[in-house]
Image (spheres, rainbow, N blue to C red):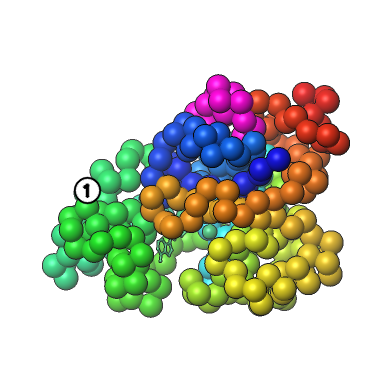
Amino acid sequence: MLIDLHTHSRHSDGTQAPAELVREAARGGLHVLALTDHDVSTGWLEAGNQAQEVGITLIPGIEISCSRRGTSVHLLGYLLDPDHPQLSGELATAREHRVHRIKVMADRLESAGYPVTFRTVVDQAGEGATLGRPHLADTLVAAGRFPDRTAAFGAVLHRSSPFYVSHYAPDPVRAVELVRAAGGVAVMAHPFAGARGAIVGDEVIEEMVAAGLDGLEVDHRDHPPPAIVRAEALCRRFGLLRTGSSDYHGTGKPNRLGEHLTTPEVLDEIIARGTGALPMGAPLKHRGSARSDAQ
Ligand code: AMP
Ligand code: ZN
Ligand code: FE
Ligand code: FE
């Protein structure tokens, strides 16, 4: 049973349509895939329909960008009700601020002579996508200014770059509360991915646990061995679910689909806890599955 619970499509900063992503997952032998676009759930329907076609299960999810006094935290929310008023309001606000922020960044880059305008970034991203720095990167790559996203991030898009602008993002404790209020399962994404920037301390994770955090994404390519040990210890201490996933972004990042996986037991627990949305696509078929008989 191969289960990958963290991937992105063109509805945020992945490079494939949801259906394309699902087809690739099925071709690669995955049985269960979660679509977790940044701050948006608009890809679920297409992904779920395609999952039904190709015979895999789709766990609908999102990855919420959060901020604790300027330090970035990503929270995965599974099986939540996307129409929950407070949650959807918070996500809509974040997406609006992201648009403005990308406009300011594009203007700054353009003023400095980089081949980018806000219009070209929006065209690059596609209508309706959650706009992010990767779309600025893709625009600069398409114009021949950098070879790939990683190079563009390293040169001009990283958090201490003069071109960097932050955007509104909810506090991680508030985000956990909203995911839970929307019937979802809250899993902190790559908690110790220190190479990408500052990370929050264990005390913030403890606050998130008190607010109802369900799990930690332990197995992730941005976690070196000491990070795994530290995350495992927190899982034991707080009784948290341990997930592992690829954080696949299509051709936008080197991450390969299915490079890290989650166990069927943890998936069963996620499905048992999530009450805001149902799994989509083909029913789960494996022994001991909490809900497979009922579906
Ligand atoms: P944003 O949310 O707009 O600030 O952009 C953050 C997103 O950019 C992350 O979720 C990653 O998907 C992506 N990202 C961050 N660093 C890099 C990098 N070095 N190369 C490619 N993508 C990156
Ligand atoms: Zn991303
Ligand atoms: Fe993330
Ligand atoms: Fe991600």
Q: Where is residue 36 drawn, in percent x and y?
A: 55, 46
- Residue at (79%, 60%) from the top-left corner? 240
Q: Residue at x 59, y 37 (%)?
A: 29
Percent of width and height locating residue 268 = 79, 41
Quadrant for the C terminus in the image: top right
Residue density around tag 1, few if under 14, some if 14–19, many if 20 or more, within 10 Å: few
Residue 45 position, x and y percent, is 53, 29
Between 83 and 133, the one lying in front of the other is: 133
Q: Which residues are magenta?
A: 43-59
* Quadrant of the image occupied by residue 229: bottom right
* Residue 174 visible in this rendered orientation of the protein: no
The image position of residue 79, as x and y in percent, is 68, 39
Q: Secondary structure at mark 1?
A: helix
Q: Amino acid at mark 1?
A: Arg
Q: Is residue 158 above or below residue 11?
A: below
The residue under label 1 is 119
Q: Nearer the viewer, residue 143 or 178?
A: 143
- The residue positioned 55% from the left and 67% from the top of the image is 222
Can residue 169 be found in the magenta stretch?
Answer: no
Query: Magenta span: helix, strand or loop, mainly?
Result: helix
Residue 155 occupies quadrant = bottom left
| Residue located farthest toward the left when viewing the structure as drawn | 113
Left or right of residue 106, residue 52 in this image: right
